[in-house]
Amino acid sequence: KAGVTQTPRYLIKTRGQQVTLSCSPISGHRSVSWYQQTPGQGLQFLFEYFSETQRNKGNFPGRFSGRQFSNSRSEMNVSTLELGDSALYLCASCPGELNSPLHFGNGTRLTVT
Amino acid sequence: SQQGEEDPQALSIQEGENATMNCSYKTSINNLQWYRQNSGRGLVHLILIRSNEREKHSGRLRVTLDTSKKSSSLLITASRAADTASYFCATEVDMRFGAGTRLTVKP
């Protein structure tokens, strides 16, 4: 099985712009979660989607949004980028059942200048 | 705040030594999971221990779970330089991660 694929791998944007990141989960996985990782704040949970519905949400401002499509692929969008949004964004998928571990992609490195 | 919190924050050992890191959590759980992250990469699932298990082994990894103390430990035996990474725990309650333990294994 192919692993979790995140695109693009690297991205450079300017303050005020918006960005869309993509995540293709492992085939058959219905849950997709997004995390932001920075040196200062560590690994923070953004949100989780299951069968196209947002099931859980972290404490991020409304500038951060996401969605999931019927094929379980997910996108996250950040609008009005700030310098502090520079981070490694990680996506993880799992079947969605209890006791199923997360499978992570290698992330998208976003740099905001 | 998240369920899982790892300690110590950093650990430096020599190759061949054992490494022990700990995880504490707040509420009742069904399972606890340990993950490893190499620099700049995604996390890799190492092992899952269920709440009715006290100990679990996988290769050089040994995980214990004490539900009365709401804590878990991860032991890596006979460590190698390739074990250098950050280690995280999470529970199924929220699948949120702490700051992790940064393990450095010196050759």
Image (spheres, coloured by chain):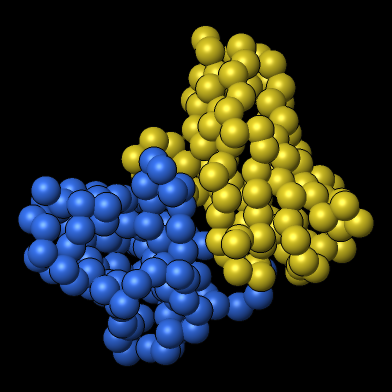
Q: Compared to A99, does A53 lie above or below?
A: below
Chain B display color: yellow
Snapshot quadrant of residue A40: top left
Q: Residue at x 26, y 56 (%)?
A: A85
Which residue sits at x=45%, y=70%? A59
Q: Position of residue B56 (x, y in %)?
A: 79, 47
Is residue A25 toward the left or the right of residue B15 in the image? left
Q: Do we see residue A101 in this rendering? A: no
| Residue drawn at (51%, 27%) of the image | B84
In percent of width and height, residue A100 lies at 60, 68
Chain A representation colour? blue
Is A61 in front, or is B100? Answer: A61
Residue for point 34% across, 72% down: A61
Does residue A20 lie above or below B22 as drawn?
Answer: below
| Residue B94 in the image, given as x and y percentages of width and height | 60, 69
Left or right, B40 with respect to B86, comes to left
| Quadrant of the rendering where the N terminus of chain A is positioned | bottom left
Position of residue A40 in the picture relative to residue B99 (left or right): left
Question: Hey, which residue is sitting farthest right in the picture?
Answer: B68
Q: Is residue A17 above or below residue A28?
A: above
The image shows residue A22 at horizontal and vertical percentages of 24, 68
Choose between B69 and A96: the one closer to the eye.
Answer: B69
Total residue callouts: 0
Mark yes or no: residue B82 visible: yes
Query: Splitting the image into 4 quarters, where does residue A98 fall?
Result: bottom right
